[in-house]
Amino acid sequence: MKHKRMMHGNLRLRLGDFELNSGDFSLKLEGVTVLFGRSGSGKSTLLRAISGLDKRTEGSLNVKGQVWQEGKRRASPQSRNIGFVFQDAALFPHMTVRQNLMYGLKRLPKGVAPFSDAEFSEIVSRVGIADKLDRAVTFLSGGERQRVAIARALLSRPELLCMDEPLSALDWRSKAELLSLIEEVVAAYRLPVLYITHAPAEVERLADRILFMSRGRIETIETLQEALARPDSPLFDEQGAVSVLEGQPKPIEAGLRPIVMGEDSLWLPDVSELKKETVRVRVLARDVSLALSDPQDLSIINHFKTTISELIPQGDHRTLVRLQMADGQKLFAEVTAHSAQRLNLHVGQSVYALIKSVAMTE
Amino acid sequence: MLEIFGTQVNLDPIWLTLEVAAITTVVLILLGTPLAWWMAQMRSSNKVLLEALVALPLVLPPTVLGFYLLIVFNPNGPVTDFLRFFGFEGQLTFSKTGLVIGSVFYSLPFAVQPLMHAFEAIPHRLLDAAATLRAGVLDRFFSIVVPLSQRGFLVAATLTFAHTVGEFGVVLMVGGNIPGETRMVSIDIFDHVESLEYDQAHILSAIMLIFSLMVLMLVYGLNRRFGVKVG
């Protein structure tokens, strides 16, 4: 069972009327794991229990072969090599930005090489706070505070980064900027991340894996694709089923951005600059129509040849059709039950998926 | 003896008062800080009892506190015996040591309450953040809690000092009125008034008035400066 990149545990924590009782769980510490659930489901409590921030935690927690919790005995948070980014940044108000950053740096354990000046500058400019080092933190905007908090956590050389709704207090513009930053940081430092959010858009953009919580329990831990494959996925909001497709962006042609997915290409009207090698796009099931032949005289650009892998009747005379694309990615289409009957849709059939609208994940 | 406006005034009681007040302030900051921190962290209902105990000297007539201390400090009692075991000589009643101990109890709420409120006002997330940045318990206390509670410490020290300077009942009960030994300024003024030596009483009172005003102004001035820096 012991694996060097695994977290195994079963944590309990009682806080007044609320009780966290995670149940046994095993989690691969790689990429981004999103802790997802309604407010009050215990996401933050679980993250605090994992970080060792609450003395009242009980149960067991084993991380990469090290014991972090056994019964009531708890390894101190300062011994766990974690970085934590709080919802409100939690910067030390009596220090400048630089002093905040140095706080963790000065307390690195013996044997862990501190960052060189060059590395320090690299992190600071990557995070975008190089010109604010000598400011008092009280004069920073919300987005800037979170940037400092992220840099401060990174500089303490964590082996696991915990983020508790880091974007929830920000306006949409800062949110978008910080999401890109987090994505970049995760890729650059190859840090496993535990990330709390209740915004499906953030999940679709960042998650490799999702840990669903409800009433203090961990319900399931699934990959993003598995979670999106469920027709009743908790990730779907009032807009209905969503598919997230992954592909490699190529240079812009004729005002459109091609995203290569195996032999197919998806054309995006979004021509903003991209630094990433892989992008995720979000397609609403209700924006996908089906045709039995490839229509040429149509304004819709994105046509894909797909195979029907499942028909899922929904209420309201609608049918959700699960499609498999040529490169194996899954795509949902929502059609009326009437159309499904008229076209005689059945599993294994080849159909063309026409995607009316598509957007890069925010 | 010093001659001021043609009147012979003995300033020893003033020096003694300042000395006792200064020692009491140092002792109370050292003892009151961990007590206040402990109380600020408490969630259980024991906190109510502890808060009430700490606040007791505010309500109790000083003579009551002094009386109990006098009983406890009995030269043949267990407390004195206990201290003698550790090499303590002399006695607690009618001595400077006794005065300081009495003042520590008497001024306890004035040190603990401002500190506790200052500690309670510190967002817990800051300490959590410090812990994840590998600061241990004491490290967190000195690098985060103390700097963010500067105001609390300033208020606690000032109030303790000022309150000790102004005490009368406890001092009289525990220390008595031995010239040069336990005669504090408040008692000295009382004595002068009793013996109708109004000139001496006037001079000592005026000195205390001016001194107290100056100390308070200094502190509020500092407080304002800290306020801008911290706020």
Image (cartoon, helix red, strand yellow):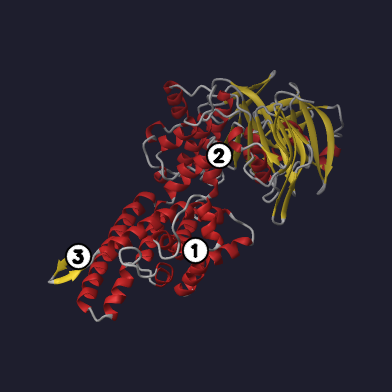
Q: Residues within 10 Å of mark 1 (few under 14, many from 20)?
A: some
Q: Amino acid at mark 1?
A: Pro
Residue A132 position in % (x across, y down): 38, 36
Residue A194: numbered disc: none
Residue A231 position in % (x across, y down): 79, 39
Chain bearing mark 2? B
- What separation in Å lies between label 1 and label 2 (alpha carbons)? 48 Å
Judge from the rendering whether residue A36 lies leftward or rightward of residue B179; answer left or right. Answer: right
Is the C-beta separation of discs 1 and 3 under 8 Å?
no
Chain bearing mark 3? B
Residue B109 position in % (x across, y down): 47, 63
**Residue under pointer 2:** B131
Q: Nearer the viewer, residue A234 or A43?
A: A43
Q: Judge depth for marks 1 and 2 and give the one in front.
A: 1
Residue A84 position in % (x across, y down): 57, 37
* A39 w.r.t. A323: above or below: below
Do marks 3 and 2 share a chain?
yes
- Disc 1 is placed on an element classified as loop
Q: Amino acid at mark 3?
A: Met
Q: Residues within 10 Å of mark 2 (few under 14, many from 20)?
A: many
Chain bearing mark 1? B
* A278 w.r.t. A37: above or below: above
Judge from the rendering whether residue B183 lies leftward or rightward of residue A49; answer left or right. Answer: left
Residue B1: numbered disc: 3
Q: Amino acid at mark 2?
A: Ala
Residue B75: numbered disc: 1
- What separation in Å lies between label 1 and label 3 (alpha carbons)? 33 Å
Quarter holding the C terminus of chain A? top right
Q: Earlier in the sequence, mark 1 or mark 3?
A: 3
Q: Nearer the viewer, residue B71 or A85?
A: B71
Q: Quadrant of residue A202?
A: top right
Q: Judge depth for marks 1 and 3 and give the one in front.
A: 1
